[in-house]
Image: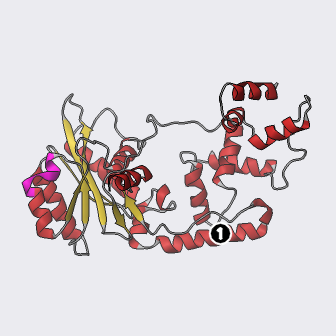
Amino acid sequence: MILELVDEAVGAGARLEVVCETMGLSARTVQRWQAQDGGQDRWYGPKHAPANKLSDAEKRQIVAVANSPEYRDLSPKQIVPKLADRGIYLASEASFYRTLREQQLVNHRERSKPASAHRPSEHVATGPWQVASWDITYLKSLVAGRFWYLYLVIDVWSRKIIGWQVHETECKELSSELVQSIDADADVDLAGWVLHADNGGPMKGSTMVATLQRLGVIASFSRPHVSDDNPFSEALFRTLKYRPGYPTGGFATLDDARAWVEGFVRWYNTEHLHSVIRYTTPDDRHSGRDVEILANRRRVYEQARRRNPSRWSRQTRNWERVDVVVLNPETKEQIAQEKIAA
């Protein structure tokens, strides 16, 4: 039946590779079946369990850890590095997910949909205090139509929040005040620092521009009429507003909003294990402590591999530090278009 369906689809003009992929087969398998000139079912499954299969006891331990009070609100991507920091290796994230999926314990619990990525102007960072991203977002109050405004600056390389303020209004004077407060607290000269933002009035106002020029900060802006060209800030706001405990009904007062954001910033900088920086905290990466943390994780994985080498068919997990971060890297399509235009 499979061969008949394949022949029918190919005869109608479809490519063999596409037909086989749709049916869950490889093209080589179908070609081999056709060459054998027989009609019986040749779809063989594995004849024995893999030698490195998790035991029932190991699976029970994974489920127990994932459901424990300490880890039940975290994903396996957060659980595994936290265990590694304590010198414990149970299984990979894939094994965690597979085991939890067998027990029907994997469910999407966020209210959001997956975010899409867009890439405008490019800036490369190889360390902290080189490239930053900032934006303003609305925080609802209990009064319909009234909002508080959160000004937030994030270091692109370390993902650390390096400046924030909450105000009743949004304007260029308050934006300038935020940058000046960052300059006062920073232990580095901000000359040459790239600060990326969208095209809003508070970002491009005369007071803000004058402050950036005085400090030697390089202003960078999103493309006109493209609202999501500032992905680092947009991703951070998404994390903030889908954080458990975020008051979706609104904040009662400005002080309440400031207190909540202060707690979020403390958690985000010092506790949150960020996926794109090898599941270290932004504060650890910003200060350089992540080097020792990642080295320790490599040792834990190597020791686990030596104890049970059959569990790994390839190298252990990559705990190498991410040295280069690019804000809005140019796509292959954009490069091709530029070559054509040239």
Which quadrant of the figure contains the N terminus? top right
Residue 275 lies in the magenta-colored region: no
Most frequent secondary structure within the magenta stretch: helix
Q: Amino acid at mark 1?
A: Val
- Whether residue 90 is situated above or below residue 141 in the rendered picture: below
- Quarter-wise, where is residue 42 in the image? top right
Residue 119's x, y, as percent?
36, 50
Give the secondary structure at mark 1: helix
Side of 102 relative to 267 (left or right): right
Segment tinted magenta in the rendering: 201-207
Which quadrant of the figure contains the C terminus? bottom left
Q: From this viewpoint, is residue 112 visible?
A: yes
Side of 271 relative to 124 (left or right): right
Q: From this viewpoint, is residue 159 visible?
A: no
| Nearer the observer, 281 or 69 | 281
Residue 138's x, y, as percent?
24, 40
- Whether residue 271 is situated above or below residue 45 in the rendered picture: below
Figure disc tally: 1
Q: Residues within 10 Å of mark 1 (few under 14, many from 20)?
A: some
| Nearer the observer, 338 or 76 | 338
The residue identified by callout 1 is 300
What residue is drawn where x is 30% and y is 68%? 130
Residue 203 lies in the magenta-colored region: yes
Side of 81 relative to 3 (left or right): left
Residue 137's x, y, as percent?
26, 44
Residue 183's x, y, as percent?
19, 68
What residue is drawn where x is 25% and y is 64%? 194
Q: How is the image coloured?
A: secondary structure
| Nearer the observer, 257 or 44 | 44
